[in-house]
Amino acid sequence: MSPDIRDEAVEMWFGPQHVSAHGWAAKLTVVGDFIVECDPHAGYFHRSAEKVLEFRTFKQGPLVLERMCMLEAFLAEYPYISAVEQIAGVEVPERAKVLRTIMMEASRIHSLQFWWGQFSAELGLFAMTLWPWVDREFFLDTFEELTGSRHAVSFSTPGGVRYDFNEKVLKKLDRALQRLEQHLPKFKDMLLRSPTFRMRTKGIALFSYEDALRWGLSGPNIKACGVPMDLRKDWPDLNLAYDLVDWEVPVVDNPDHPGQSDAYDRMVQRFLEVETSINIIRQLLPQIPEGPIVDPKARAKTNRLPAGEAYGRVEGTRGVTTVWLKTTEKAQTPYRAKIRGPCFASYYSLKHLVPGSTFADFIVVFGSLDPYPGWWDR
Amino acid sequence: MGMIRVLGDIFRVLKHIVRQTFSRPFTYFYPFEDREYPERTRGRHIHIRENCTACGQCVRACPVVAIRIDKSDRKYEKDAALYFDYTRCIFCGLCVEACRFNALFHTPVVDLSEPSREALHYDPERIETLEREPLEWRGRRFR
Amino acid sequence: MNALLLQLFDNIDIIGWLRGIPDWIHGIIVWVYTLAVGVFNWAWGVFVWAWNLALDNWLLLFKAIVFPGLVFVLMLIIFDVWFTRKVWGRVQARRGPFHIGKYGGLQIFADAIKLISKEIIIPRGAKRWMYRLLPSFLLLVVLTPFAFVPWTSEWVITDLSVSLVLVFAFLTAVPVISLLTGWISGSKYTLVGGFRAASNQFAAEIPLIVSSVGPALLAGSLSVLQISQAQTHLWYVVLLPVCFVTFLVSAVISIGLVPFDAPVADSEVIFGWRTELSGVYFTLTYFAEFAKQVLYSALIVALFFGGEYGVPGFPPFLNFFLKFLVVLFGMIIVTSSFYRIRQDQIVKYSWRYLLPLSMLNIIVALLVLAYVPGLAGILAGGG
């Protein structure tokens, strides 16, 4: 930035009291209608979760994790549980594996549906905000039928799952999936084929795979560049049941700019994600094995863990979510827990993505990365 | 050609909007109607003192220290009084899971709004019963 | 020196001067009294003149204040707010307001009471008097063109030979007020919103006027009443369908509704030029937006859909009002189905597409008139 531009520049705070900045704030330096500098600030949503985890037992820990991101509670609580199970060296029953996988994929669908609505609201169409949220209600009803709570589910536990499927849950899950499958063409018409949506998102926030790797992006943001980088395939988890399913990692390959992705590609990618998740659930539902849902011996083993450290990870809706756990001998609580949320990287990549775009496009750039403040303020 | 395709997309969007306009809304009249809560709903607790053995496992399981136990307050042979603080409770269900004597349960009552913070501290009498006054507003009774 | 002073006192008759004071005071009182009486008589005369004028023109007064005038327009705006919220609710799979009044009909009054009774917070950087005056100016400017809306051929407040031009002249002041409000509010976001509102009008105004040139040409008049009267046999929307669409779209741009609501885009610039307005001032601007929506819907009916002519046998006003409702509904549907587009895109697309399309339609319509025999006879205005 040359010094004479800086003379005309105006500093504008986007947040923390802005309508669309809920729990974050970015300092924008604006020249005319163009942003020349973006300084995202984290810390408005800080809840000191890592410190809180040091005072919670291994059964209570997932409760903190699922409150990191209520939208993907099933996915968010899993890395902690995975780390605990690795340290204890336990394997969960077959039925629990399949149930976990199904509910994690359902959680991914519901989180992406929320994001469609949120992104549409940021682009000014409230009809498209509420239509996916109506379908999302059916998933929430399923979660409530299964666990008794709509958002803070606390479903998995070290050594298995806490709640079992029954006829009602299966019926509600099937209804939710059916409704979504029925409405997907409508959502595609409203989002991907809408001329105004294309006008707003095509060519916005274009970055390449190399850039994304350098900034630490993961999940749909990097898959939209045409690279099948997915933890579900790359790091097969023993306590999940992805090996029972025949599926491919969805990637977008846009012929206009190969190896790069813009906001439109990321929307396409998230539609593909939902279709893949539906596919996985549909394949897993008939092959739920009979048996116990929790191994009492394994669960008892996690009351006190041996000394060790483990790295639990999961492919979340927004990217790779990991928890690093270190325990001391016969510990009831972790010695240190470190959470790596997927959105810290995508939030701070605004620093590179935003300069050069117009002031009106800032929220499109932000929204297309699907960041959630809970993941960058821990 | 491209313009005609754009016009087609515009008409498709308008078709979806008009169809939604003349179809049934999804919302319901909340204070007058209510949805059915499933059996597993983690609402406020109920404490059955006949079964209670004053083991204190619920207190130990609670991650947010919302339960207080008074072992000297006895109604039956070996029970205890429980005080619930619903300003702290996160409805995780660990206390109900920890109870092996079928003495503590969740109920499907989820609307706990009270006029003051103090009213959310449930004393033993309130946590043992489920009675609540039917609410009335403008001559209409709901729930 | 002394002698000189004595001589001076001898020359001035002090006692006589003192004797004259009462007369002098009386003179002043009489002068003031006469002036007061004169002013009172003049004012009374004005009152009597106005009273007689009102009695002579009681119909015009009634029109201006009650039926197609102020009261009716306010009721219409209130209805429009309710109708818009209901349709928006339906589009979004909700129900809209339903608690207060039958089907939520009184919700707007509850909202207005709430908004008016709110504390008025004027920012420190704001110009206080401008902040207080501009919203009322805005409502005034938007309500004035309703005088020219021909609800029927009788129930129109007034009509000039250039009323179509006057309507646009009044509405041109709206973005000026928006820009001023954004400027004097003392906030960066309001300034951005104000410039966006001005830019919106810059994009919309020329296509708007050019598309209204079509009906004016066909009717051979610039009066809204005469244009609507000229469509006895043929609605102009048949000859000018593209002009109707461009008029609708540029009207939406000018109002600043959803696909083109960059001036008040809540996810970008918090509430645009209205961010710092509070309480009753916000209510006025909110009403002005809906008033513009009503005004443009009525203008579309008058210019393109044959005004009072429609189903034969129906009362003319009912004809107009039914068409008005349909156009209003269409406008709400259009404004709730698209994503907000950027400000530079608004300007670009309205100049690139709306303006040539509306011009092309007028040329094509004139060619059709020239080469299709018998069509000119149908048009009562003699195109």
Image (cartoon, coloured by chain):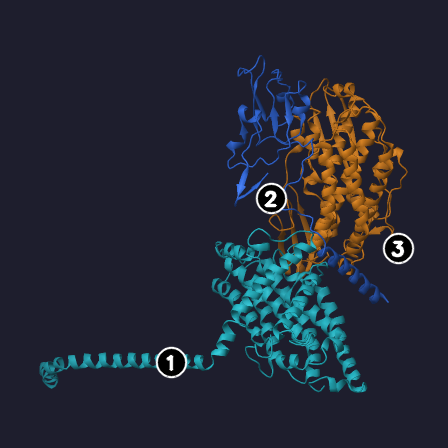
Chain at numbered mark 3 = A
Q: Which residue is mark 1?
A: C48
Q: Residue at x 57, y 60 (%)?
A: C274
**Quick check: can you spot residue B107?**
yes
Q: What is the number of the mark on residue A255?
A: 3
Q: Colour of chain A?
A: orange
**In the picture, residue C205 is in which quadrant?**
bottom right
- Spatial CA span between label 2 and label 3: 54 Å
- Spatial CA span between label 1 and label 2: 59 Å
Label 3 neighbour load within 10 Å: few <14, some 14-19, many 20+ = few
Which lettered chain is shown in blue? B
Q: Nearer the viewer, mark 1 or mark 2?
A: 2
What secondary structure is found at the residue carrying circle 3?
loop
The verdict on a common chain for dots 1 and 3 is: no
Q: What is the number of the mark on residue A188?
A: none
Q: Which residue is mark 2?
A: B32
Q: Residue furthest front?
A: C313
Q: Nearer the viewer, mark 1 or mark 3?
A: 1
The verdict on a common chain for dots 2 and 3 is: no
Which lettered chain is shown in cyan? C
> x and y percent of residue C311 in the render?
68, 74
Is A21 positioned to the left or the right of A89 in the image? Answer: left
